Image: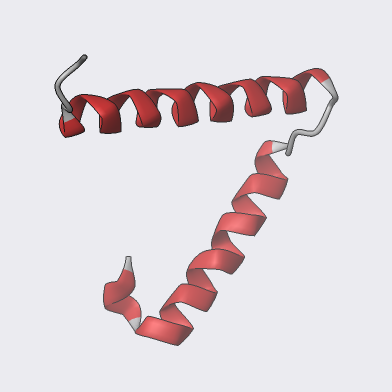
């Protein structure tokens, strides 16, 4: 029986999650679910404005 190795188990779980996230992203690209540079910049600007409004300018 294998001795429990929590750090190794955590790494394996993280790796599985990471690979799944990459696969979801690749599927989005294949399906055309992408943002233009302008759309991404607009979304990031809006996000940062909301973050600053909620937490102040030291939030980022």
Q: Position of residue 1 (x, y in %)?
A: 21, 14
Q: Nearer the viewer, residue 31 or 34?
A: 31
Above or below, 53 against 3 in this view is below
Left or right placement of residue 46 versus residue 59 in this view: right
Q: Residue at x 33, y 78 (%)?
A: 57
| Image-based side of 49 in relation to 55, left or right | right
| Residue found 75% across the figure and 33% down from its top | 34
Residue at the spot 75% in from the left edge and 28% down from the top edge: 28
Please give the count of numbered marks on the rendered protein: 0
Front residue of this view, candidates 31 and 51 = 31
**Quadrant for the C terminus in the image:** bottom left
Identified at 56% across, 62% down, the residue is 45
Say which of 8 and 46 sits in front.
8
Q: Is residue 46 left or right of residue 16?
A: right
Please provide percent x and percent y for residue 42: 65, 56
Does residue 13 lie above or below 54 as drawn?
A: above
Residue 30 % position (x, y): 79, 18
**Residue, far top:** 1
Quadrant in the picture for residue 4: top left
Protein image colouring:
secondary structure
* Rendered location of residue 17, percent (x, y): 48, 31
* Residue farthest to the front, as pictured: 1
Q: Based on the displayed image, in which of its 4 quarters is residue 20 positioned?
A: top right
- In the shown orientation, is residue 16 left or right of residue 23? left
């Amino acid at each position: 029986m294998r001795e429990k190795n929590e750090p190794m188990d955590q790494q394996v779980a993280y790796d599985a999650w990471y690979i799944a996230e990459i696969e979801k992203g690749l599927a989005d690209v294949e399906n055309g679910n992408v943002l233009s540079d302008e759309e991404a910049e607009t979304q990031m600007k809006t996000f940062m404005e909301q973050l600053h409004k909620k937490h102040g300018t030291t939030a980022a």
